[in-house]
Image: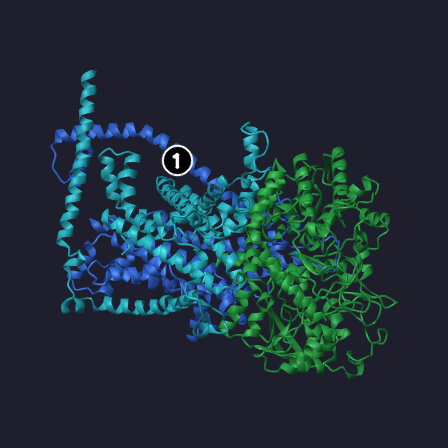
Amino acid sequence: MANEFEQVENSEKVVEEFVAETAKNEEVEVKAKESVMPKAPSKLKLSKGELKRQSVLLVISAIFVLYGILFYYLPLGGWIMAFQNFKLKTGFLHSKWVWFAKFKFLFPTLKFWTREFWDGEFIRVIRNTLGMGVLNLATTFIMAIVFAILLNEVKNKFGKKMVQTISYLPHFLSWIIVTGIVHDSLSSTGIINELLRNLHIINDSYNFFAHPAWFWPIVAFSNVWKETGWNAIIYLAAITAIDPCLYEAAEIDGAGRWGKMKYITLPSIAPTIMILLVMNIGNVLNAGFEVQYLLGNGLVQKVSQTIDIYVLKWGISQMDYSLGTAAGIFKSVVAIVLIVISNTIAKKAGQESLF
Amino acid sequence: MAKDDFKLNYEASHGKEITDEEAKVLKKLAHKNTKKMSTGDIIFVICNTIFLILFTLITLYPVLNTVAYSFNDGLDAVRGHIYLWPRKPSIESYATVFAIQGFVQGAKITVARTVLGTLSSLVANALLAFVISRKRFLFRSQLSLFWVITMYVNGGMIPVMLLYKYLGLTSSFWVYVIPGMVSAFNVMVLRTYMEDLPTELEESAQLDGAGYITIFVKIISPLCKPVYATVALFVAVWQWNSWFDAMLYNRLKTEYTTLQYELMKLLNSVMQQSGSGNSTSQSTTTSKQVTPVSVRSAATVVTMVPILCLYPFLQRYFVTGLTIGGVKG
Amino acid sequence: MEMKRFLALGMAGMLSAAALVGCDNGGNVVDPVDPVDPAEPGVTEPGEKTTYSEDEIINFTMFSAMPGSEINDGNAAQEEIAKRTGVRVKETWLTGQTAEEAVGSILASGDLPDFIDGGDGMVQLYENDVLVAWDEYIEKYPNLKELYSDAEWEFFRQDDGKIYWANVFCNTYGEPKATGHNDEAFWIQCRVLEWANYPTIETLDDYFKVLEDYYAEHKSFTDPAGNDIPIIPYTALCDDWRYFCIENAPEFLDGYPNDGSVIVDTTTMKIVDYNTTPTAKKYFAKLNEEYNKGIIDKEFATQTYDEYIAKLSTGAILGMCDQNWDFNYTITPIFADTKLSDLGCEYVPLGLTIEPGMKQRWHTYGDTLNNSSGCAVTTSCEDPDAAFKFLSDILDQDIHDLRFWGIEGQDYLVDEDGMYYRTQEMRDQLNDSTYKASHVCNYSYMPQWLGTSKDGKNAMQPGEQASEFYAGLSEPLANTFKAYNAGGYPDMIGSVVEEMGIWYPMYSYSNAMTAETAGGEAWTKMGTVKHEWIPKVVMSGDFESEWTKYMDAYNACKPEDFLAEMQEELERRAAMAE
C-alpha cells in the first residue's frame, strides 16, 4: 500500500516536471520565433527601402493623422478659454485674458505643505474623484475579468449565452433608473434592511445614505452592477482567440479547471487586460457625475462631490465656460501623466503597452 | 488504439518521444489525475453555477423591474414599490411612446446612422489598428500615442461646434457618422487582438508577395471576427443611443432627428407637465395620464429591444469561440 | 453627454419652478379700457377677420430654453390659429442642457430660430446682438403695449435703452380670478383638521401640536385598497435644489414674502439674512425637538424627490412644508385615482407664523414682474413685423380662447349665460398627452393674460375659472373650506392682501449671481454649508452645540459679502421705482 502511494507521489512529481518543461520549451520556442522575426523597432532604420516598403502603411496613417488633427486636436484651441474670461460675444480673440486666475480659483494656494491647501474644496473634490475612480476601476475591472473567465468555464452553450445576454442588459438602463433601484433596496423598507432585520443584525432600519463611509462602496457596487457584463464582452472576445490545443495539452498534463484558468486563460488574455488597465487608469478622474449626483445628499456631500459636480456648481450653472475648461485641462494633464507612468511600468514589466 | 492516441498526443504536445512503458504510466496518471480533479471539478462547477445564477438574477432584476414599471399605469407607478410585476397593468406608456410624431422619421435616421456609422467606424478602426499592430511599422509608437491622447482631451462644446459649422457638418446627416468614426479605445482593443494573432499565415503570405492590404483583408480580418463583432457592438450601441448630437447640430432640422432624441424630448415634456401640473384640472380622475417614471421605463425598453435582437448575431462570435488554432497547425 | 442630460433635468425643474412662482397669484392688474365691450381696440372686429390659405401662411420657429411638450404637425388648434393669423410657429424646447448651454450652442451654430425665450441665457442673446428691439412694435400694436404699464416697460430696458423681450407671464387682465395657492405653505391633510374639529392653527407650535395629537391616536390607517399604511406625521424634503422645503420657512414664519434668498425689511429698507434670525433658530430647534420625538420622518434627509412623492402618494404623510407646484399636481390626481381624497388625505395650506397674531405673506398678491427673460424676436427672422403682429394677434380674445380653452364644442362648451365650461369627458381628454399633442396649442411662452376675459365674465385661462375649480373638489376638501369659511386656497391661507414693492422678488437677482463676484462666491458656499448642516442640526442629539458649529461654518462663507450685494441691488431697484 505504502509503496503504491509513494509511486503515485513520485509520478505526480514527474508530471509536474513535464508541465514545467513544456512551459520552458514553449518559452524557448517563442524566443526563437522572435529572433527570427524582425520585431524590435529599434533594429529598423528610417531607410529609403524601408519607407518604400511601408508606403501603404504610411499613407494610411497619414490620412488618420490628418483626421485626428482635424477632429481632435484642432478643437483643443478652445483651451485658451481657460486663460480668458471667455464670453461668446467677444470670442477667442477678444475675450479678456485672465491667464491663471481660473486655475488659481481651483487651487487657491499651491503650498501643499499647509493645512489650507489640503482643506481646499477642490482638493477634497479631487480626493473624492480619485477615491471613487480607483475603487470603481478596481471593482468593475476585476469583476469583469472574473465573470468572463467563469463564464468561459460553462460548457452548456445555451446557459452560457443566456447568462451573458442577461448580464449586459443593465448597461442600457440609465443611471436614474439604476440609482432609483439602489435607493429603493437600501431604504428603510427596502430588501437589505428587511434582510438585516430578519437576521437580527439590526433592530431598527439602518440609513445607508446618511453615513459617509457607505457612499463610495455603494457607488462602486452600482457600477459593478450596471457594467460588469458589458465590460466582460471584450474579455470574452479575447478568450476566443486562445488556441484550444493549449487546453488539450494542459489537460493531458493533468491540469484541472483551476490550473487551466490560471496557466492558460489568464495569461492568454493578459495583454488585453494590461491594455484596458492602462487606458482605464487614465480615466480615474472621470469617476462620473450622474451616479454621485443621484445618490448623494447633503449629509454625505463631503465625500460625494466629484470634479464634474464641482465644475457644474461653480462653472456651468453660472455661465463660466472658462472654469470648466480649466478643470478639463487639469483632468487631461493628470490623465496623460497617469497613462504615461502606467504605460512605462507595463513596458518595464515586459507587459503589453499602449505605445 | 487508445494507447497510441495518447502517446502521439503526448509526444506532439511535449515535443519529445516517450517509450510505450512511460506512456502507460503517464496515461494511468493522467487518468487518475482527471479522475481526482473531477471531484474538484464537480465542486467548481457547482460553485460556478451558483455564482453565475446569482449574478444573473441580480443583474436581471433591474431590467425586469424596468419592464414592470413600463407596463404599469403611469400614475400608479409614481407610488413606487413595484418589483417584478406591474401592479396596475397598462400599455398607455407604450402608446404614448409610439404616438410620438417623429417616431418613424427618428427610427429611420437612427437605423441609418447605426448601420452606416458602425460599418464606417469598423473599417476605419480596423485599418488603423492594423497599421499600429504591424511590428515593423516605423512610427508605430508615435501613432499610438497620437491616438491615445485623443481619449483624454477634448476642446469643449463651443470650439467643436464652430469647427463642425465651418466644415458644413451642422444641419446634416453626416455629423452622426464622420466625426466619431475613429475611437481610440476601439482601435486599441482591435490592435491588442491583432498583435496576439499567430503570425505564420501572414509570414507565408508575405513570402508569396502579398501586400499589406491583401494581408489585412484576406488574412487578418477573417481571424478578427470575434473582436470585430465586439467593436461593432460597441459602436452600434453608441450610435443607437446617441441623441445629444442630434439636438446640438440638427435642432431645427426635423428630418435628421433621431429616435433617442425624440424619446428624450417626450420624457422631458412629460417631466415638465408633471412638474407644472395641468392647469385645467385640479382634481380629476385620469386613468390615461403618463408620468416620467412610466415613460422613462417604456422608452428604455423600446430602446433595448432592437439591440437585444441584434445581439445573438454578434454574440456567436465571441461566446462560442472560434477554433483559430486550426490556423496554427 | 449623460451628465449634461442629467443636469438639465435638475435645471429644468428649477426653470419651470421659477416660471411658475408667483404666476397664479393674480398680479399686474390691468384695467381694461372698457371691460364689457368686446369691440374695443385690441380686439379684432369680427368683420375684419380674414382667413389665410396654406400658401399665405408664414412658418416661424421658436426655441424656449425650458422643457416643454412639442406639439404635432397639423395640431387642430394650431391650424385654426394659423388660418386666422396667417402664422404657424414650430416650437422646440430645452432637452438635456441648461438654458445657458443651449443658448450658447445656438449662438455658436448660428442657427437661430425666429422667436426665442432664452431663460437664464437671455443676457447672452442680448450681448451677441441677435435680438430685434420691441420699441417700434410696442407703439404699432396696442395689444402688446397693453401688456405692461409704461413704468413696467421701463424695467425691460437694457443698457442701450431698448426693450428686447417681454416676460409673458403674470399679467392679469381686469379682475383677478385666482383660486389656487401655487406657492409655499405648511400643508396639512384635511382629515387631521376634521379630527381636531377644524381648530385655528396660527403658529408652528400649534401645527406640530395638532400633528402630534393626531399621531398619538392614529399610528396607521387602512387605505381604500385595504393596505395598512403606517403614518409619518411630518417629512421635509432636502433633495438637491428642492431643499428650499426645509430651508426657507424662517422668512415666511417671520411674516415676510417669498423674496427667496433674503428678507427685505420694508421699514428700514435693509436686507436681512433669514438663516441666522432668532426665528430660524427657533424653527430648527422645533424641528430638532420633533425629530427626536419621532414625529419627523427618519429618512427625511436622504430621501430623493421620487421617494418623497411616493411617500406622499400613499397618504402616509400628514403634513410638510413645500411649494404647491412641487407636489400637488402629481399628488392630487393620484389621491383622486386611489380614492384617498375621500378619506381626507388631500392637503390644505396654512399660513403659519412663529408667534401668534402676526401678519404673514405666504400668498403673494399683486405683481411679480420678472424682467430677466421673456419672449424675443431674433435677427434671423426675415419678417420681424409679421412676427410682432403675430404676438399681438394671439392676444385677441378669440385667439387667446383658442390657445387656452381650445376649440369650442370640442374642448369646452358655452352655457346660456356665456360661461365656458368643460365636461368631465373633456377634462379627461385634455389630460391625455397624445390628445394634447394633436389638439392643444398654447404657445405657452408667448404673451398671454391671466384674470378676466375681455367678455367680462370668463377667466382668461381655464385653471382660474371658478366652476372648473369647484367641479373637482372632493368632499373632505370642500368641507374644510366651508369650515374655515374660505372661498379657495388663498382665503385658507389668509395672507395680508397687499401689493409687493417694485423690488420684489429679490431672488431674481441672487439667481443670476456668478462666482465672479465675492457675493456670488459666498452665495454658492452658503448653499453648500446649508445643505450639509441643516439636516445635521435637525437630526442632532444636542441642538445647541450643533447649531453653534453650523453657525461657525456658515459665517466662514462670508455671508456679509452676499448681503452687501443684495443691499446694493435693493437700493438700485428702489431708486428705479422712484
Q: Residue at x 31, y 51 (%)?
A: A275
User: x%, y% of residue B305?
Assistant: 50, 54
**Observer-nearest residue: C22 or A292?**
C22
**Is A307 left or right of C510, judged from the image as shown?**
left
Residue C437, above or below A199? below
Name, please, the residue furthest toward the top.
Answer: A1
**Percent x, y for residue A301?**
52, 47
**Chain that the image shows in blue:** B
Vertical arrangement, residue A298 with respect to residue C456, above or below: above
Q: Residue furthest right?
A: C417
Q: Chain of mark 1?
A: B
Q: Position of residue C59 (x, y in %)?
A: 62, 77
Residue that badge 1 annotates: B48
Return the residue nearer the eye: A6 or A24.
Answer: A24
Say left or right for C140 vs A74.
right
A305 horizontally vs C217: left or right:
left
Q: Nearer the viewer, residue A96 or C88?
A: A96
Quarter of the rendering containing residue A27: top left
Which amino acid type is marked by label 1?
Answer: Asn
Viewer can see residue B225: no
Which quadrant of the rendered structure holds the C terminus of chain C?
A: bottom right
Identify the hue of chain A: cyan
In the rendering, at what x and y percent does residue A270 appear?
Answer: 29, 46
Q: Do we see residue C369 in this rendering?
A: yes
Query: Quick one: which chain is green?
Result: C
Q: Residue at x 17, y 28 (%)?
A: B25
